Image: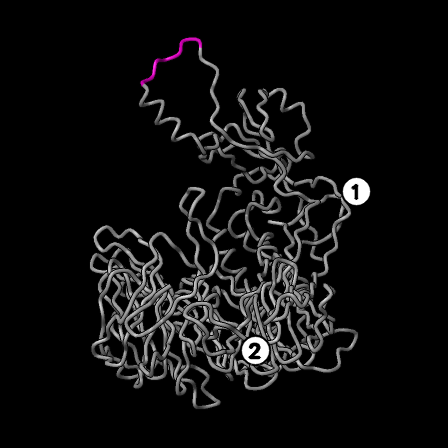
């Protein structure tokens, strides 16, 4: 976690990681003698397969031509019950005090800033009739006159056979045959196809079917697409360019920062034999841009906000935070290391006819020739500045642990690069409308599960693997990379690991130099309990020489056998946890002493809460729970449930009140920023949708609930 004193050391580690990846592939491929038998004078190219009518994979032989060797990588008023006390409540529902989380709706009390697709709307927070500001994100449409169908290497893709069938084109029934379809140019036409029940032409000797069998067939086939009636067309529309999408807003004083994503809409590399362009190593599926707007003066005539600065950054968006005037964005860039590996697979024509030793020698020479050019391209695309210190980048390692020499990453330790980017939201001088950023990061072979941040500490929780020698199995392991964000520039700080994975960001919390994490492990082979839920405590390092977060304690299994964790909320020395299988055990744990974390009390009730919110009602400390009511016998969901838990007596928590809205659902179960509790007026605002599958009594909007001791009313 000390990073690299010299950037040369980072490059050396990247070379070592590539060598390890190459060695893993070569050792695996050396045992494959399929291509050892081919004739070098008439090399057999790589075999290919195709799906049959039953979606099975069948061997179709070999392509007519071998794939050519790739070239080197060159203010509010009450409505119910009369007037209520005015209350300002417009902040985001954040996890940690002093840390603002990015959201698609923000307010400073004077204006509301709302992102909708590629448009940012701003209106007066107390009087929506005073006008609005509309800011559209820049978008440049493709010149469709220059678009052309892509070409693809390898054997041609044949369409599936199409029987004569009734197909509905824009609600008009037309009988078309396979011959008629083949005579029409399909690739350059846009067709709307509605799949309906179709009546086949009777066979020569139709078989009499019972009315019941006909009804069953109609029910099964009403929304089914028959595979042999479909044909492979163009995998994507080359002339289609999705509009940008606003993913997050960060607000500080008179500055609004907007994080925008623009999808590249290419599921795999576009191939054109007439264009000499190398496939990129960074295979991000979107372009991410930070834009900072001036909101000191908001126009009300429909015009846009004033853009101060913008910057395109690497990676796909994971999360964002701000502490005072410093914004933080966490992204992940996916590295296409397969480009490096492709020349090592034994199916490559140059290895045709070579025995094991000859293959390994030539593959080794290929690695020696390709490593430096590949690294140069990777460093250039990542925009890594290797001309000084690289102490902001974690040293490269595999996201795995345990007593095993087996590599669960298949040798690929450079497949992802996670970065924590910081920028000053209040900077005054935007030179050429640019934004100065600082970056800390790490290569990761796992995948980011959650992001946690306090005012001076941020952590990415990546899921990798750990080998369990007692069972001989690889199990999920969460690897924590801690960053120091107490200054403008983030720095690597510490690392640690715990078994399992957290359910959401609220399962992690920092308290008195200890990081507490609730994780869940699954073991389907365990006949006693397929789940194992625990609280782990990691102590932050005290010495500059030791950067590892040491285990400080853990609990036993949380909940009953087979129960899963549905909600977690840490509040200082207490942890409130909901587990669920058929009933909702609500647990209170004392976590003040990491070495002696213990259960204080529990409550069992039907249903579950998936979000817990601390409140105080008439001076009494409570926990609000938002989740679902579930039938205790059948396990069938009943509807939206809001619970009020009395936690005054930690040994005997009670459900003080509950409200069940049958048939209703709320996105607040997963989108915790979508709800709001008004502390002065004791009202809970929750999004709700309800569908009756008729034209009546459907609802999609927000509901306000009055929360009081002993009652919850709509």
Tell me whether the residue at label 1 lies in contact with that at label 2, contact meaning CB atoms closer than 8 angstroms: no
Q: Which residue bears the numbered disc 1?
A: 145
User: In the figure, residue 515 lies in which quadrant?
Assistant: bottom left
Q: Nearer the viewer, residue 205 or 121?
A: 121
For discs 1 and 2, the disc positioned in front in the rendered view: 2
User: In the figure, residue 665 lies in which quadrant?
Assistant: bottom left
Q: Which residue bears the numbered disc 2?
A: 322
Mark 2 Cα shell of 10 Å, populated few (<14), some (14-19), many (≥20): many
Residue range in magenta is 204-210
Percent x, y for residue 350?
Answer: 62, 46
Q: Is residue 672 left or right of residue 237?
A: left
Q: Residue, x 76% and y 73% (percent of image)?
A: 433
Task: Tell me how far mark 1 sits from mark 2, CA to CA.
Answer: 44 Å
Percent x, y for residue 566?
Answer: 34, 64
Percent x, y for residue 593?
Answer: 30, 86
Q: Residue, x 23% and y 64% (percent of image)?
A: 605
Percent x, y for residue 293?
Answer: 69, 72
Count of numbered marks: 2
User: Does residue 209 belong to the magenta stretch?
Assistant: yes
Q: Residue, x 33% and y 59% (percent of image)?
A: 628
Q: Nearer the viewer, residue 100 or 554?
A: 100
Q: Nearer the viewer, residue 607 or 72?
A: 607
567 is higher (above) or lower (below) than 489: above
> Quarter of the image containing the C terminus?
bottom left
SS for dot 2: strand
Mark 1 Cα shell of 10 Å, populated few (<14), some (14-19), many (≥20): few
Q: Magenta: predominant secondary structure element?
A: loop
Q: In the orientation shown, which residue stands out farthest toward the bottom?
A: 543
Asked if residue 620 can be seen in this view, the reply is: yes
Mark sitting earlier along the chain (1/2):
1
SS for dot 1: helix
């Amino acid at each position: 976690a000390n990073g690299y004193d010299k950037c040369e050391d980072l490059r050396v580690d990247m070379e070592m990681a590539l060598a390890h990846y190459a060695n893993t592939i070569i050792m695996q491929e050396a045992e494959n003698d399929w291509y050892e038998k081919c004739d070098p004078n008439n090399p057999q190219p790589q075999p290919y397969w195709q799906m049959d009518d039953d979606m099975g994979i069948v061997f179709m032989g070999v392509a007519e031509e071998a794939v050519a060797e790739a070239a080197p990588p060159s203010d509010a008023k009450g409505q119910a019950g009369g007037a209520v006390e005015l209350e300002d409540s417009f902040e985001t529902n954040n996890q940690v005090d002093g840390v603002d989380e990015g959201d698609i709706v923000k307010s400073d009390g004077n204006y509301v800033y709302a992102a909708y697709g590629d448009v940012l709307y701003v209106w007066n927070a107390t009087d929506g009739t005073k006008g609005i500001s509309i800011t559209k994100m820049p978008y440049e449409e493709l010149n469709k006159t220059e678009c052309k169908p892509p070409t693809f290497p390898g054997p041609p893709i044949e369409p599936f056979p199409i029987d004569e069938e009734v197909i509905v084109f824009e609600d008009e029934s037309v009988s078309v045959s396979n011959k008629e379809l083949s005579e029409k140019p399909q690739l350059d036409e846009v067709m709307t196809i509605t799949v309906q029940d179709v009546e086949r032409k009777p066979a020569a000797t139709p078989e009499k079917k019972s009315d019941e069998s006909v009804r069953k067939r109609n029910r099964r086939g009403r929304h089914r697409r028959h595979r042999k009636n479909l044909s492979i067309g163009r995998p994507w529309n080359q002339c289609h360019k999705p509009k940008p999408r606003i993913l997050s807003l960060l607000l500080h004083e008179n500055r609004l920062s907007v994080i925008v994503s623009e999808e590249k809409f290419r599921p795999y590399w576009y191939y054109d034999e007439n264009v000499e362009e190398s496939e990129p190593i960074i295979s991000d599926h979107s372009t991410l841009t930070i834009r900072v707007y001036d909101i000191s003066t908001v126009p009300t005539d429909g015009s846009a906000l004033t853009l101060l600065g913008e910057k395109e950054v690497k990676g796909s968006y994971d999360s964002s935070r701000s502490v005072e005037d410093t914004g933080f964005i966490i992204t992940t860039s996916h590295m296409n290391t397969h480009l490096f590996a492709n020349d090592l697979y034994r199916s490559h024509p140059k290895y045709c006819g070579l025995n094991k030793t000859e293959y390994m020698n030539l593959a080794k020479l290929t690695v020696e020739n390709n490593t430096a050019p590949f690294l140069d391209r990777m460093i250039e695309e990542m925009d890594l500045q290797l001309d000084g210190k690289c102490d902001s980048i974690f040293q490269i390692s595999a996201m795995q642990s345990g007593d095993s020499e087996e590599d669960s990453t298949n040798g690929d330790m450079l497949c992802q690069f996670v970065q924590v980017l910081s920028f000053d939201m209040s900077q005054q001088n935007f030179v050429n409308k640019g934004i100065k950023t600082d970056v800390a990061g790490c290569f990761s072979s796992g995948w980011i599960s959650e992001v946690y941040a306090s005012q001076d500490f941020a952590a990415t929780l990546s899921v990798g693997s750990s080998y369990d020698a007692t069972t001989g199995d690889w199990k999920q392991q969460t690897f924590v990379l801690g960053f120091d964000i107490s200054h403008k520039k983030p720095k690597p700080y510490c690392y640690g690991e715990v078994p399992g994975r957290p359910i959401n960001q609220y399962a992690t919390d920092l308290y008195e130099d200890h990081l507490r994490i609730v994780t869940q492990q699954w073991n389907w082979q365990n006949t006693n309990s397929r789940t194992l839920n625990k609280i782990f405590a990691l102590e932050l390092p005290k010495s500059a020489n030791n950067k590892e977060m040491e285990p400080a304690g853990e609990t036993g299994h949380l909940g009953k056998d087979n129960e899963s964790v549905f909600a977690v909320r840490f509040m200082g020395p207490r942890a409130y946890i909901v587990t669920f299988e058929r009933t909702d055990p609500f647990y209170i744990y004392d976590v003040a002493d990491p070495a002696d974390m213990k259960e204080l009390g529990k409550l069992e009730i039907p249903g579950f809460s998936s979000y817990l919110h601390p409140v105080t009602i008439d001076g009494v400390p409570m926990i609000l729970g938002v989740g679902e009511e579930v039938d205790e016998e059948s396990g069938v969901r009943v509807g939206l449930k809001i619970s009020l838990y009395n936690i005054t007596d930690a040994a005997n928590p009670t459900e003080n009140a509950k409200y069940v809205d049958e048939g209703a659902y709320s996105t607040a179960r997963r989108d915790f920023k979508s709800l709001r509790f008004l502390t002065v007026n004791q009202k809970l605002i929750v999004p709700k949708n309800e569908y009756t599958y008729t034209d009546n009594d459907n609802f999609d909007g927000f509901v306000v609930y009055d929360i009081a001791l002993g009652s919850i009313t709509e």
